[in-house]
Image (cartoon, grey):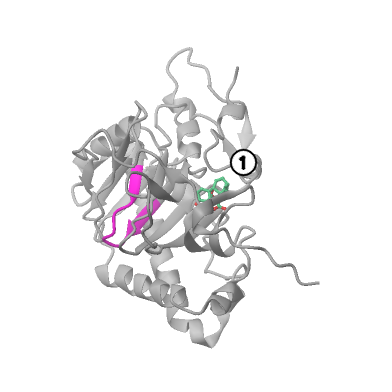
Amino acid sequence: MVVLVAKPTIDQIPLIKSPKQSSFFSFIPIIDLSDPVSASTSIVRACEEFGFFEVTGHGIPRDLMIRLEADAVKFFSLPQVEKERAGQPNPFGYGNKKIGANGDVGWLEYLLMDVTSKPMNHSSLSFLSEPSATSFRSALSEYIAAVRRLAGEVLELIADGLGIKPRDVFSRLVMDEESDSVFRLNHYPPFPLFQGLNRSSLTGFGEHTDPQVISVLRSNDTAGLQIALRDGSWVPVHPDQDSFFINVGDSLQVLTNGRFRSVRHRVVANGMRSRVSMIYFGGPAPRERLAPLAQLMEDGEQSLYKDFTWFEYKASAYKSRLADNRLAQFEKQ
Ligand code: GA4
């Protein structure tokens, strides 16, 4: 039996009514990793205040980013039937406008893949094993190895900044052989301008927090990413194709008993230019228990959260809608 699933059309994509933000200046911290001593303190401050920061001085060759971006653009330029050979995203594969399984839609197409620490097996995306995908495959493995190392380095600097030992208390979660990490390539195409869109904007990727420990994003020079501040206002993130943007995920918020903030973010589609982003989501191994680290608890401080594993959290996250507060049901009353 052939099941035809209609793709959402442009008028079914939700609008963002207030795309213009209250704060004109973006004061998102920019942290230079080539100065690790000052970086560790600034990273901790940024994770507490924003749950988000930009990193420079990361040592990842520009070439590698450009090469993967070019391969991604080549993939997204293929005829639709070719892209669909990557399989429906359940959750891994090629997705077009539909995000997750619960009715969320956005103005984008994407490739979502499962990346454990072991050399990429591409079990989820068999088209990548074909000879025609050799260049794409090698750029992907090299890039993913590099951003995983970067995630590990940032997590070690976090341990330094918090004054806790061993340095790998957090980084071991994403460096673990069984670390449940995901990689996503997003393409937000330009869209036909039509009446009424000038005062609101199309949702590229609706607001949400990332369930994992840490996410490492790199995009081309097209704007669109916005983060929510503690007061709920939205701030645009100025794109920089030579930098990486780091997000604190829900799991890191739990590990720090709420001291770090899992940042709510969204992408507003740009009518004029394509945005291409690539994001590594570093998650723990399924068996890992997510509980505040004892070393971070003050005398008498209680955990804000119930006891759960990443396996349990992920299962519940994948049943939720994008904008849901996924941690709410894991909080102690
Ligand atoms: C958000 C972070 C990552 O992009 C992602 C997303 C996942 C998906 O696209 O399938 C989810 C979303 C993300 C959280 C809630 C569920 C699952 C879509 C969705 C509605 C790959 C992830 O791990 O969680």
Residue that label 1 marks: 320
Q: Where is residue 11 drawn, in percent x and y?
A: 50, 54
Question: Does 122 sit above or below residue 112?
Answer: below
Question: Does 323 sit above or below residue 124?
Answer: above
| Extent of the magenta region | 216-226
Residue at 38% across / 44% down in the picture?
A: 247
The quarter of the picture where residue 289 lies is top right
Beta carbon of the mark 1 residue lies under 8 A of ligand 1: yes
Q: Where is residue 32 drawn, in percent x and y?
A: 20, 48
Quarter occupied by the N terminus: bottom right
Residue 270 relative to residue 313: left or right: left
Residue 179 appears anywhere in the view:
no
Question: Does 126 sit above or below residue 174?
Answer: below
Residue 264 relative to residue 127: left or right: left
Quarter occupied by the C terminus: top right
Q: Give the structural element (helix, strand or loop) at label 1.
A: loop
